[in-house]
Amino acid sequence: MRLLCFYSIGLFLIVLLSGCQSFRATAVPSPFAHQLVRDQLIIHSDFSLPERHRLVEELTSQRGVMSEKLKLSATDEPIHVYLFSNDQSYYDFLEQRFPSFAGRRAIFVETDIELAVYAHWGDHVAEDLRHETSHGYLHAAIPNLPLWLDEGLAEYFEVGRAKRGVNQAHIDHLVAKIDLENWKPDISRLEQLNVAADMTQADYAEAWAWVYFLLESNDDKAALLTDYLNDLSQDGIADSLSIRINKRLAGPELALIEHLQSLR
Ligand SMILES: [Zn+2]
């Protein structure tokens, strides 16, 4: 689960991670002796990465994948990725640098001077880096991206290109709720969320579901999302996506449920 928080300590910070509270950053020595530059990504690590590591190549190509899928112009704002070789040094760093986020597996931090991802080289590093780097690419291109959509898109891209956005954990979660008849999708409700701590696992799943439904349905629903993102990208403001969907589609909630059921 990743969350979003807005907090000001002189710098304007946005943090997306698996839990979020305000924090006071303190200066600590940098443990990152190695640096690798791949297009938009500047990877700082406390260990030596091979020049052509497959995960680094994937994260680099994700820029083009997202740009093509979302029909966004690629940007060149640097995204700094800070990598630790082991979990203990990562969690120790988090404890010192971002104490309110101690224990979080990976985080994305936006300040007015930097887009940054922090993570450690553990069992979930690929998923975590695809997710957090997605936030980086999105924030570099789109101002004022709504929280729920930011997370829905990151959940879509975290699974890797080969899976084409299929996030099986979210499908299982939502299909189980559909079977129990205790879930009704409501994109307008998601749009009201602006505090990351308020987002539940079900919210993440539904955010992913709307993104997947729009991008991967057979007809031209993708344009609803890509046009919206492009309007935000160009103007920094757009009427809500739910209004656009309801103008264009009849019964989008039922269509979303049917789409999820087809993924069983
Ligand atoms: Zn996230």
Image: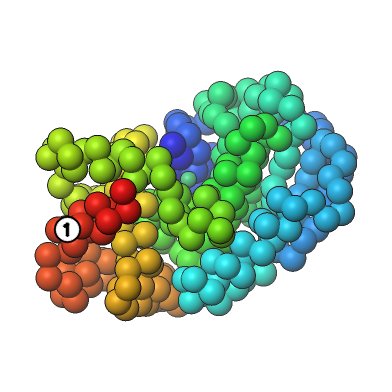
Which residue is drawn at the image coordinates 57% and 31% (left, top)?
105
The amino acid at mark 1 is Glu
Residue 254: x and y in percent read 14, 58
Identify the image's colour scheme: rainbow, by chain, secondary structure or one colour: rainbow
Residue 58: x and y in percent read 68, 57
| Side of 239 where 37 appears, left or right | right
Task: Tell whether circle 1 marks a residue whose Cβ is less than 8 angstroms from ligand 1.
Answer: no
> Could you say which is closer to the camera, residue 68 or residue 195?
68
Q: Quadrant of residue 181?
A: top left
Q: Please name the residue that numbered disc 1 is placed on.
A: 253
Q: Is residue 204 above or below residue 101?
A: below
Total labels drawn: 1
Q: Is residue 199 visible?
A: no
> Could you say which is closer to the camera, residue 88 or residue 261?
261
Quadrant (top left, top right, bottom left, bottom right) of the N terminus: top left
| Side of 212 where 165 appears, left or right | right
Q: Is residue 70 visible?
A: yes
Which residue is drawn at the image coordinates 17% and 58% (left, top)?
253
Label 1: state its secondary structure: helix
Which residue is drawn at the image coordinates 48% and 60% (left, top)?
164
Q: Is residue 23 above or below residue 249?
A: above
Q: Is residue 245 above or below residue 81?
A: below
Q: Quadrant of residue 259?
A: bottom left
Residue 3: x and y in percent read 43, 40
